[in-house]
Amino acid sequence: MGPCKDIVGMWREAALKEGLRFGVSEHHERSYSWFNTNKNCDKEGICAGIPYDGNDPAYEDFYYEPHADDNCAYPLNPSPHFVENWYLRIKDLVERYHPEIVYMDGGVPFGEVGLAMIANYYNSNINQRGGKLEAVHLFKDVNAIFPELYHGEFFEGIATEDFECGVTDKIMSEPWQSGTHIGDWMYNRNIEYKPTSHVIHQFIDIVSKNGNMLLTLPPKPDGTLDDYCMKFLAEMDNWITVNGEAIYSTRPWKSYGEGVVQSSSGAYKEQETKYTASDFRFTQKGDSVYAFWMEWPQDNRLIVKSFAADGQNDKVEFVRLLGYDGNLEWQQKQEGLHITLPNKKPCEFAWALEVR
């Protein structure tokens, strides 16, 4: 059945060839409920009333045995056979392909069996990496969002928390992730894609709060990306070439930012934010603090209040605009760090100052 190709292995080989981290998402625990539609039949047409193949006991090893779980959540009463099969499938996945990221679509399923699966993933990665744990297991507290359905257990600290299509409103003490998409989770020719500026603004906000973005670009049925996705990647490439220094290997500063515009906290709360020239987000690396802003001021002048010479902050010794070779005019005053920007922008979206 299927394409008779090692799809996961092909993805892994392609990712490693490009020097990328390789990860997988698994949604198998949900299939017990989602796939239960195979026990139904057409309601109209020439096949109306004819049971689907899932009703035939001869095919239970493929379609699952009859059961009452029939929704989009985790199963409440799965058969022991299904639970064992789920564990062995994920065990095979991590031990055969050694993914550095495993994304789970909810909390921990099946009690001790689910916890044993995560432990096996961590231990397998430690053995593969010569004693160093580099595996990232991602899970979500979906029950807090949809309490009427069961989506597994959430134990804070045992894995990395993912906020699906969302962010936080503060610096998190532990690394976290925003799993989101450029338009939809799968290819949809009728969907309106997010502007590149929206993705970059959200990306900066996430990094300033100790998070990272896992972004989905949906391939077409033939495996290629459409023109908009290719345009987005080119624009993102141009932006990261200029500003990657303020993103990669950075950590949050004492404050994630300043200004009046705030992002809503929680999953499914991402939105396109209308930033102003007085809204900043900060990252830090070594002795440098990077100050991002998302809207270029009409008068080419910035004031960063967080670097004010008010006795509470260190003396500023150096200011540089990433992507600009010239020297900036700047002055640290009582009300903030005043900067005069050049007339030409170094990139199209969102810019960063290095401040020492």
Image (cartoon, helix red, strand yellow):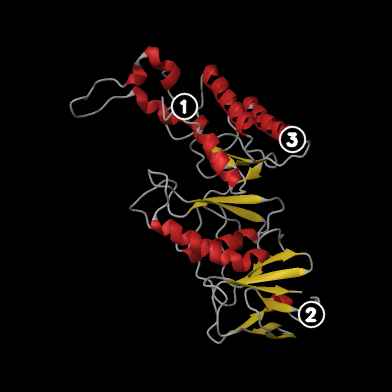
**Image-based side of 63 in relation to 165, left or right:** left
Residue designated by label 2 = 317
Image quarter of residue 254: bottom right
**Image-based side of 196 in relation to 178, left or right:** left
Say which of marks 1 and 2 sits in front: 2
Tell me the number on the disc at residue 126.
3
Count residues near mark 1 (Cα–Cα under 10 Å), then give few for <14, some for 14-19, many for 20+: many
Q: Secondary structure at mark 1?
A: helix
From this viewpoint, is residue 74 visible? no
Q: Earlier in the sequence, mark 2 or mark 3?
A: 3
Residue 344's spot in the image, x, y percent? Answer: 55, 82
Point out the image quarter for the C terminus: bottom right
Say which of 17 and 143 sits in front.
17
Indicate the amino acid at tag 2: Glu
**Image-based side of 67 in relation to 53, left or right:** right
Q: Earlier in the sequence, mark 3 or mark 1?
A: 1
* CA distance for labels 1 and 2: 61 Å
**Residue, x 68% and y 29% (percent of image)?**
120
Indicate the amino acid at tag 1: Tyr
Q: Earlier in the sequence, mark 1 or mark 2?
A: 1
Image quarter of residue 46: top left
* CA distance for labels 2 and 3: 44 Å
Above-or-below relation of 256 to 53: below
